[in-house]
Image (tube, rainbow, N blue to C red):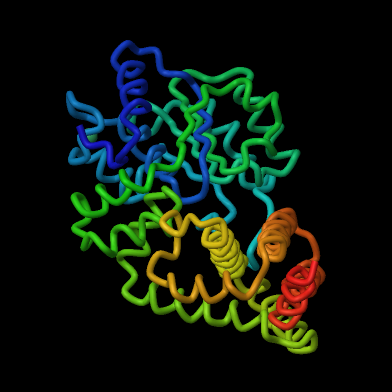
């Protein structure tokens, strides 16, 4: 057996039992935060239903290997980054074009495997038309078709769609399990594994790619320095930063989403230090910087900063005007001078 997923034994047991008893659902909703391993589970399940060995998924038969390499004709993945159109600007919807063929294809038998598997990565991104097209297949599932809907924003899905799927929830792993897996399975040094486990928020896929990226920690250090510079900036300088981030956002949404998530984590840590819980911080390697910032701001300011960053992340994910969102954010982040004033005032009261 070669499920590549670690830390989700209950889910795997459930799927193995369903496979053995022939009671697999025709559709699964795999729900969980980004990089938690939803696609890894989807690939494992696609292998399991098409594996040629007696211990599915074996990971070594021709079918398992072709699925792992993304080269199996019966496995179709739909996402915002459809391979067919790499040169297009980043899209915000999985449209009807992407799922148009799905209905027709679902009605034909598999080319070479036992099951045709349709994976939708980012189901919340389906346009209304596309979601209705998927719904039609879910309503009358053809034999030998398995539909896997992946989503990190389950609450945005149509209830008519989710009610027709069996739900598999992937919760983030605890920091201690992540740490253990990173050391034992990926050979990470224990201190680095501890930091990556904390930074990943229990999303192992993220931790593994960050471990493999030799420059990640240095990039993060520079990003945090740039973020922390904002609190000392004038409003004019902050608007320049907002303009620069808007340009970056237009090139890569993930770039700015990553930066804002880093900032959110940072303010959360500042709050934890202020609350007297420094052991719980994420940025464990930058404790002295955290302590310095925790001394500069009162709790209400750190809380309001975290709230503002959180709102900006939410708004950008639903396609609000990026320039406006980022400018409002820049206005809302407390300044060092204002913090000093507030502390003096608070001190006098
Ligand atoms: Zn196999």
Q: Is residue 84 above or below residue 52?
A: below
Locate residue 317 relative to residue 122 in the image: left or right: right
Locate residue 176 relative to residue 1 in the image: left or right: right
Residue 85 shows in this picture: no
Q: Position of residue 281 (x, y in %)?
A: 46, 59
- Spot the residue most to the front: 348
Q: Position of residue 298 (x, y in %)?
A: 67, 67
Image mark count: 0
Q: Position of residue 205 (x, y in %)?
A: 38, 52
Q: Is residue 296 above or below residue 194?
A: below
Residue at screen point 63% across, 21% down: 163
Query: Which residue is nearer to you in this view: 186 or 270?
Result: 270
Locate residue 343 relative to residue 294 in the image: left or right: right
Query: Which residue is nearer to you in this view: 239 or 295?
Result: 295
Q: Which quadrant of the view contains residue 216? A: bottom left
Query: Which residue is nearer to you in this view: 153 or 238?
Result: 238
Residue at screen point 60% across, 23% down: 138
Residue 57 shows in this picture: yes
Q: Which image quarter is the C terminus in?
A: bottom right
**The image quadrant in which ligand 1 is located:** top left
Locate residue 311 relative to residue 173 in the image: left or right: right
Q: Which image quarter is the N terminus in?
A: top left
Residue at screen point 79% across, 84% down: 235
Q: Is residue 155 above or below residue 184?
A: above
Residue at screen point 64% across, 77% down: 248
Q: Is residue 15 above or below residue 91?
A: above
Q: Position of residue 253 (x, y in %)?
A: 62, 66
Query: Which residue is nearer to you in this view: 140 or 44?
Result: 44
């Amino acid at each position: 057996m070669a499920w590549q997923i670690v830390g989700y034994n209950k889910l795997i047991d459930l799927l193995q039992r369903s496979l053995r008893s022939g009671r697999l659902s025709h559709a699964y909703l795999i729900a969980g935060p980004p990089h938690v391993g939803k696609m890894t589970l989807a690939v494992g399940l696609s292998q399991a239903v098409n594996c040629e060995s007696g211990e599915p998924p074996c990971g070594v038969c021709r079918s398992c290997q072709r699925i792992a390499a993304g080269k199996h004709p019966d496995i179709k993945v739909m996402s915002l980054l459809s391979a067919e159109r790499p040169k297009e600007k980043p899209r915000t919807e999985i449209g009807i074009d992407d799922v148009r063929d799905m209905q027709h294809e679902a009605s034909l038998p598999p080319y070479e495997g036992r099951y045709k598997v349709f994976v939708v990565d980012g189901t919340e991104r389906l346009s209304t038309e596309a979601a209705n097209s998927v719904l039609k297949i879910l309503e009358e599932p053809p034999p030998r078709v398995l539909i896997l809907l992946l989503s990190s924003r389950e609450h945005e899905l149509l209830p008519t769609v989710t009610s027709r799927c069996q739900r598999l929830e992937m919760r983030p792993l605890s920091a201690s399990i992540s740490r253990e897996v990173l050391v034992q399975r990926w050979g990470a040094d224990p201190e680095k594994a501890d930091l990556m486990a904390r930074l990943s928020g229990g999303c192992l896929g993220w931790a593994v790619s960050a471990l493999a990226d030799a420059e990640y920690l240095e990039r993060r250090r520079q990003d945090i320095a740039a973020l922390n510079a904002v609190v000392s900036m004038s409003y004019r300088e902050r608007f320049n930063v907002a303009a620069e981030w808007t340009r970056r956002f237009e090139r890569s949404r993930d770039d700015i989403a990553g930066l804002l998530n880093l900032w959110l984590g940072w303010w959360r840590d500042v709050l934890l230090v202020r609350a007297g819980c420094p052991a719980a911080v994420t940025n464990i390697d930058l404790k002295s910087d955290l302590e310095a910032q925790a001394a500069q701001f009162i709790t209400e300011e750190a809380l309001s900063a975290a709230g503002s960053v959180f709102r900006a992340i939410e708004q950008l994910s639903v396609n609000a005007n990026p320039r406006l969102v980022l400018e409002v954010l820049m206005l809302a982040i407390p300044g060092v001078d204002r913090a000093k004033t507030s502390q003096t005032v608070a001190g006098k009261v």
